[in-house]
Image (tube, helix red, strand yellow):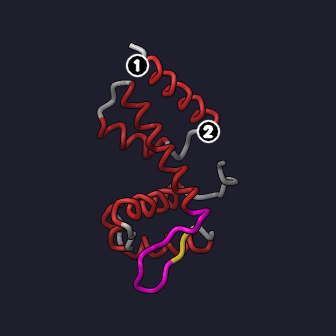
Amino acid sequence: MPLAPLKLSQSLEDYLEMVYMLRKENGIARVKDISTALAVKMPSVAKAVLELKKLGLVTQEPYAGVELSKDGEKLAHQILNRHLLLKLFLMKLGVSEATANKDACSMEHILSAETLSKIGIFVNEFRKKGSSK
């Protein structure tokens, strides 16, 4: 069930999504790794983590990795799923994977829930038709 919408900026959504992905891939999301993955400076990551802490989405002990709260994990999962859905949709249209990934990152922040829902229905129908051939 989707969380009540928080007013997260595109940037904070990207940070939250990256914490989620790094924790899934490496078991830990360090400020340095987030900085490298998003190609931003470490003070920018520290500022974003502080904002996410204030919203109750992450926790971090000094000199430790960034942890997701229960709500933070749910929201990050939703953000990542939006990204993956849009990437898949664009690739089904014939867009290269690299471009689809880049464009999905931009689109995931601006499309309405209604539009994302319709894209999800379209992709699922496309999958069903593709598997019945």
Q: Residue at x 38, y 73 (%)?
A: 31
Looking at the image, is mark 2 or mark 1 earlier in the sequence? 2
Viewer-nearest residue: 1 or 79 = 1
Left or right of 46 on screen, residue 98: left
Q: Residue at x 30, y 65 (%)?
A: 36
* Range of magenta residues: 60-72
Secondary structure under tag 2 reads loop
| Mark carried by residue 112 | 2
Report if residue 57 lies within the magenta region: no
Q: Quadrant of the C terminus?
A: top left
Report if residue 68 lies within the magenta region: yes
As drawn, the residue found furthest toward the bottom would be 62
Q: Is residue 113 above or below residue 13?
A: above
Left or right of 87 on screen, residue 79: right
Q: Amino acid at mark 1?
A: Gly
Residue named by callout 1 = 130
